[in-house]
Image: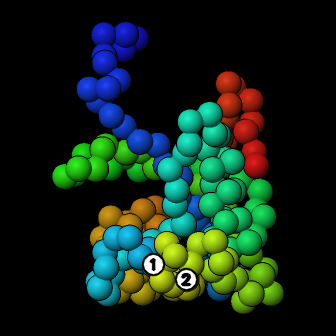
Amino acid sequence: MGTDIDPAAYPRRIGVTILVRDPQGHVLMVKPTYKHRGERLGWQLLERWVEPGETLAAAAAREVKEVTGLTLPISHFLGMDQMPKEGNAAESYSFVCHGGTLSAADASAVGIEDVARGDLSGLRWVPLSLLDDAARCYEAARVRMAVRASENGIRLPLLLAGEMASA
């Protein structure tokens, strides 16, 4: 299967995004400094590329920890978003991971860790009713899909060689 495809000729990237909610159902979103500069839109879920040899669960947990300082158990994803090649950016696949709902105390204490301050200009809880005012259309659609999946109990396990890969 696929042995005739040269991987160098078809570069693809694998990433994770993480849906984290507060008790009111608001979504944790960040504003990167490295893209969409000066735009009102551009808020997004926490995200990162998966490094070679790293599991999806470990990448998602690492991103949450590095940005917020929180240690969240990540073991499931809510959907997978394929992004087509655009400009210099390679085609990518982003697994939208379930980060759960924080307690009111944890949600109110969330902030950007020092290590992430250079990459992010802001972090906030976005009500679903304001997604279109904060995020680009594809990101708002991704968030809505993930919230629907979560609210309907749809969680797919993150596996490593057929076994649960939780972090």
For disc 1, the neighbor class at 10 Å (few under 14, some 14 to 19, many from 20) is many
Residue at 46 percent of width and 67 percent of height:
143
Given residues 141 and 148, the one toward you in this image is: 141
Residue at 72%, 89% in the rendered image: 108
Q: What colour scheme does the image use?
A: rainbow
Q: Residue 43 at what x, y percent from top left?
A: 42, 77
53 relative to 142, above or below: above
- What is the C-alpha distance between the residues marked 2 and 1? 6 Å
Q: Tell me if 83 is positioned left or right of 114 in this view.
A: left
- The answer to whether residue 153 of the structure is visible from this angle is no
Disc 1 marks a residue whose amino acid type is Lys
Instruction: Indicate the secondary structure of the residue bearing disc 1.
Output: strand
Residue type (three-letter) at the residue carrying disc 2: Leu
Work out which quarter of the rendered image holds the N terminus and state it.
top left
Above or below 75: residue 142? below
Residue 103 is tagged as none
- Which residue is drawn at the image coordinates 31% and 75% (left, top)? 36
Give yes or no for contact between labels 2 and 1 (Cβ–Cβ under 8 Å).
yes
Of pointers 2 and 1, the one earlier in the residue sequence: 1
Q: What residue sits right under mark 1 in the picture?
A: 31
* Above-or-below relation of 108 to 114: below
- Residue 119 percent location from the top left of the image: 49, 72
| Residue matched to label 2 | 123
Where does residue 60 sit, x and y in percent of width and height?
63, 54
